[in-house]
Image (cartoon, rainbow, N blue to C red):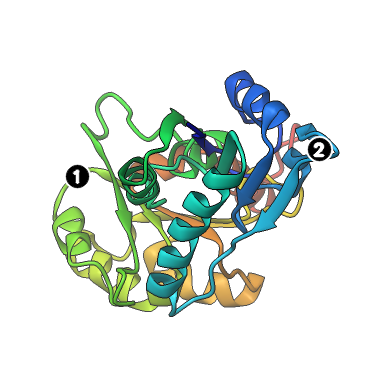
Amino acid sequence: MSTLYLIGAGPGDPELITLKAINALKRAQVVLYDALANPELLQYCSPSCELVYVGKKPGIHQYQQIYINDMIVDNGKKYEHVVRLKGGDPFVFGRGHEELTHARQHGMEVEVIPGISSALAVPALSEIPLTKRGVNESFWVVTGTTSSLELSSDLALAAQSSATVVILMGMKHLPKIVDLFIQARGAEEAIGIIQNGSRPNERSVFTELDHALDKVEENRLSSPAIIVIGEVVRLGKQHAMNALATNCATSYLSNC
């Protein structure tokens, strides 16, 4: 009986993957990998390993997911060790459980190897604490775009809370998201938008909601990006650096 190793590749930095995942890649006979999985990770595979790119295109996810599910089973009939390599964590907006269920229904063993989700890692790398005593009591991780390509209705609920809100796949609806949170929390609420988090080509904007759209256009940010909304964003490294630069420009402090 073949085994499917459902692996989370982490947020993008190839060093942010577990040793258990690396060991599974080394013994893989075929790897089906996503667009968000860093291709450098494929160097751990043996020269004889078959590498299959299964990155999705916007708007036709449903058809492609069915196709990927069938590819997993088809490869399970040919190989003993099948790896499905997914960006972040396979169970955080990764549809990993659908693949797990489909594989088991067709007689495959499944081993899940969790990955570091970008929802946690990318803010942390910018020194944004998702929770901070005295500031907030929880954080929400919400998709910005549903499977029908609409804005998630959960965002309206999240905006009403005091929680830090981490939004994945939200750049398509950024104007609606900004407007929603301004209505709920005010124009001065802090927001951070981080594109290609943890990668060498990372770019980011840290500002307030009322300046967010202008800053994104000015810096030409696009997907894939993580949106973080909440007062804890002001505690992050880049926000502190921006504040220091502003203070230095308006003062004569010798240590600036």
The residue under the point 59% across, 20% down is 20
| Label 1 – label 2 distance at C-alpha | 43 Å
Q: Can residue 112 be seen from the camera position used here? A: yes
Q: Is residue 23 left or right of 201 when viewed as pictured?
A: left
Horizontal and vertical percent for residue 190?
Answer: 39, 53
Q: Between residues 91 and 228, which one lies in front from this camera angle?
A: 91
Question: Looking at the picture, which amino acid does disc 2 mark?
Answer: Gln
- How packed mark 2 is, by other alpha carbons closer than 10 Å (few <14, some 14-19, many 20 or more), is few
When the figure is inspected, residue 249 is found, relative to residue 55, above or below; the finding is above
Q: Between residues 50 and 173, which one lies in front from this camera angle?
A: 50
Q: Quadrant of residue 97?
A: top left
The residue under the point 53% across, 42% down is 122
Q: Is residue 99 left or right of 128 when viewed as pictured?
A: left
As drawn, the label of residue 107 is none
Question: Looking at the picture, which amino acid does disc 1 mark?
Answer: Ser
Q: Residue furthest right?
A: 47
Horizontal and vertical percent for residue 207?
Answer: 48, 58
Horizontal and vertical percent for residue 115?
Answer: 50, 33
Instruction: Give the quadrant of the C terminus.
Output: top right
* Residue labelled with disc 2: 43
| Between discs 1 and 2, the one toward the N terminus | 2
- How packed mark 1 is, by other alpha carbons closer than 10 Å (few <14, some 14-19, many 20 or more), is some
Q: Between residues 157 and 153, which one lies in front from this camera angle?
A: 153
When the figure is inspected, residue 8 is found, relative to residue 219, above or below; the finding is above
Residue at disc 2, secondary structure: helix
* Residue labelled with disc 1: 162
Q: Depth-wise, is mark 1 or mark 2 nearer the camera?
A: 2
